[in-house]
Structures are given as C-alpha cells and as structure tokens.
Amino acid sequence: MSLFWRIFSLNATGLVVATALLLGPVTVSTPVLPGEALILLAGLAALLAGNAAVLRIGLVPLQRLSRAMATADLLRPGARPAVAGPAEAAELIATYNTMLDRLQAERTAGAARALQAQERERHRIARELHDEVGQTLTAVLLQLKRVADRVPGELREDVTQAQEATRAGLDEIRRIARRLRPGVLEELGLASALRSLAAEFSHDGLTVRHQVAADLPPLTAEAELVIYRVAQEGLTNTARHSRADRAELRLRPLPDGVELLVRDNGTGLGDATEGAGIRGMRERALLTGAELRVEPAPGRGTDIRLRVPAPTPDAARPPLPAAPGGAAPPAPHAPAAPGDH
C-alpha cells in the first residue's frame, strides 16, 4: 500500500469513527463537560499517534536511502539499500539503485579508457627517454672519455666529475624509464616484476621484504598490470610519506583469486584524507573487479590489501594495446602517477 493511501485510510477511519460516535449515543454539551473533554482529547491523541506511527514506518525506507546516498562512493562498490516500504519509497529506492549501477558502469568504462591511454603514454615516454635521451647521454659520456684522455692534468678532475654526473643522470633516466614501462613484467612475468620492484625500493633507510607464492593461478594481462601498479604505488607512498624503515610485499593465492599485501611500519594514514594516489589504486582495482582496502597495520603502519578474483576461462585478454606510432593523447581525469599520496 502506498504512503498516500496509508495516511488517508487512517485519517478516514478516525473521522468515520468520530462521526459515528457523534451520531450515536455520544453527545457534546455546551459548555463541554470535563468527561466529554477527556474523551475528545483521548480520541485526538489516538488519531495523532496513529498518524505518527504510519509516517514513521513509511519514512524509514527514505531515511535508509538518505544514509546510503550520503555515504555512496563509486570507488567503493557496496551493498545497495533494500527495496522495501510503501510503493513510492520502493520505486524511488529501485530507481536510485539502477542509477548507481549505471554510474558505476560508466565510471569503470571511462577509467579503463583513461588507464589504457595512460599506459600507452607511459610506454611512449619511456621509449623516448631510452632511445633519445639515453643515447644522447651515452654519446656525451663517450665524448667526455675522449676529452679526459687529452686534457691537462689540472682539468682532469673537472672532466671526471662531469663524467660521473652524466653517468648518474643516465642511470636516473633508465630508472625512470623502467618505472614508466615495466619491461620485466612483460618479459619475465609478475613474480619477477614484484621481486625487482622490492629490490628497487630497498635503499638507505628502507628495507622491503618480498614473498611471492609459486602456485599463483593464471591471471589476465590487465590483472597483472593492476597488481604491479598497486604494489608500485603502495611502495612509493611508503618511501615518500610513511617514514617507515621496513616494508613487506606479499602475493599469495586465494581459493577464488590472489591477494596482494603491501605493509609498512610507518606513521600510518591517521586522519589524512585519501589522495590521488590511493584513488588511482581504487580506479585500477575496479577494472578487474578487485577489492582494495587501506587500513591500519597490526601495531603501527598501513596495510594495503588488493584481492583480485580469478578470471573466468573466457576472460583472458591481450596486453594493453600500444597506440599507432607510439603516441596517444592523454585522457582527461587520468589517475595520478605514482607518488601522489
């Protein structure tokens, strides 16, 4: 029964009963006697209580919908409010659930296009850094070596310093190119890529231990890239923001998929709001139907858990395509690059 008919029926019942009593043995004197006033007040109180009960019951689904709308986050797919209550409220809740499903589907599709464009752009930049800038710096190093063999002794130290600076710049360019385009992921697989990532982030003041299970189920290329990028972003945040000296990188199989854990012993998130980096991880998790949780670690620090479901037999997809000619226009609203907490 709709909310309108519930309220109308209750009010109509109260008025019909009051009219029947007035036409029957019940009378109201002039002036009103105390006993008659008590009867009228009791009837009015009963009518008001009935109206309040009907409205309270009828508005509960709307209050539940209001709470769901206030806490809805397209990056955190969750339970939908139950379709219940009067006809109007049930129809409104059902329409809201349908709208939320459509918005999540559109956002996931848009994020997939943005992330594919971002990966193509990363590959293009990495290739240009390696082929253009890297070769130029290599040529500069060779030229400096020839110059160092001919310069006077008092200038040799300056040339040597220039060589070291150029060599350090070349190493940095190669490191950036590797982070932009994880060639080890494409060539050696996910397990080797995660071990290499842990070794890359193990530097002065931070030790990253890794534990990658050997019996991992087969994953799609997209799922492997999502796992790698989430691990990369988590370790980047650990190195830059957490002030931790130990971190762990684990990948283990589950009955229905795999779970990635990035844990540190740093200061934790505290009351800080999630930045573009974590939201970017959530965007990537949605692409594979994965669940991402960022929560305090036991003791201190932060846990980043990514649970990726195992693909169905027909879900295998080829790797992300490269753009023709190596170039792709950056998509709007692409998630932030690693390092933005």
Image: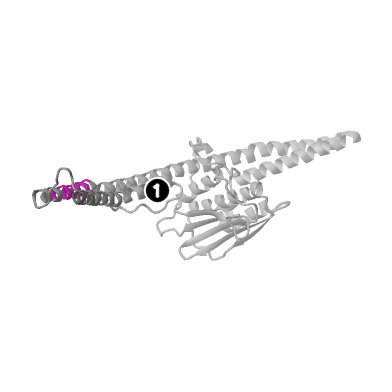
Q: Quadrant of residue 298?
A: bottom right
Q: Residues within 10 Å of mark 1 (few under 14, many from 20)?
A: few
- The verdict on residue 332 being magenta is no
- Near-viewer residue (325 or 281): 281
Residue 188 location, x and y as percent? 58, 56
Q: Is residue 273 left or right of residue 318?
A: right
Residue 241 horizontal/vertical position (percent): 64, 47
Q: Residue at x 68, y 50 (%)?
A: 243
Q: Is residue 1 visible?
A: no
Q: Is residue 295 left or right of residue 145?
A: left
Question: Can you see residue 239?
Answer: yes
Q: How is the image coloured?
A: one colour
**Residue 6 located within the stretch drawn in magenta:** yes
Quadrant in the picture for residue 106: top left
Main SS of residues in magenta: helix
Residue at image x 54%, y 56%? 305
**Percent position (x, y) of residue 9?**
18, 49
Q: Amino acid at mark 1?
A: Arg
Secondary structure of the residue carrying numbered label 1: helix
Viewer-closest of 23 and 335: 23
Q: Nearer the viewer, residue 80 or 108?
A: 80
- The part of the chain drawn in magenta is 4-16
Give the image location of residue 236, x and y in percent: 62, 48
Residue 151 vs 78, above or below: the answer is above
Q: Pointer 1: what residue?
A: 67
Q: Is residue 290 above or below residue 159?
A: below
Residue in front for this viewpoint, 234 or 77: 77
Left or right of residue 312, residue 142 in this image: right
Quadrant of the frame with the C terminus: top right
